[in-house]
Image (tube, helix red, strand yellow):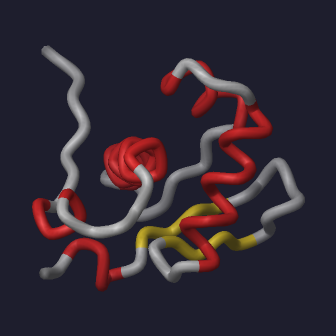
Amino acid sequence: MDNFVMVPTHLINSKIPRSAMLLLGILNSNARQLGYAYGTNKYYAKQLGCSTRTITNLLKYLADNNYITIINGNSFKRRIYIRNKVLIT
């Protein structure tokens, strides 16, 4: 089975940076089973081919712009929820 990332079409023409859009797509894919994503910054950095610092900045951007909600952000039990507005046009 091929792995792929789905990004809502209304985000493609938005001002969201492309790397943040890709991360959001990965988070959305990871959240499908449990309703939230829980991967580490290291995991997401490996997926995107960037540094963990970049992931930290992208997660902050997504949270600050209400694309995601992060629960227990400084814990290994972190949960990242995709905001409903992201999935709806």
Report x, y in % for residue 30. 41, 44
Answer above or below: position of 69 versus 29: below
Query: At 20% from the left edge and 57% from the top edge, which residue is drawn?
Result: 12
> Which quadrant of the figure contains the C terminus?
bottom left
**Pick the front one: 8 or 1:** 8
Query: Which quarter of the picture shows residue 83?
Result: bottom left
Answer above or below: position of 13 versus 88: above
Answer above or below: position of 75 versus 46: below
Query: Which quarter of the picture shows residue 84?
Result: bottom left
Left or right: residue 10 compared with residue 76: left
Query: At 30% from the left edge and 75% from the top edge, which residue is drawn?
Result: 86
Query: At 60% from the left edge and 49% from the top edge, which residue is drawn?
Result: 38
> Which quadrant of the figure contains the N terminus?
top left
**Pick the front one: 61 or 79:** 61
Report x, y in % for residue 20. 47, 51
Query: At 45% from the left edge and 74% from the top edge, which residue is drawn?
Result: 67
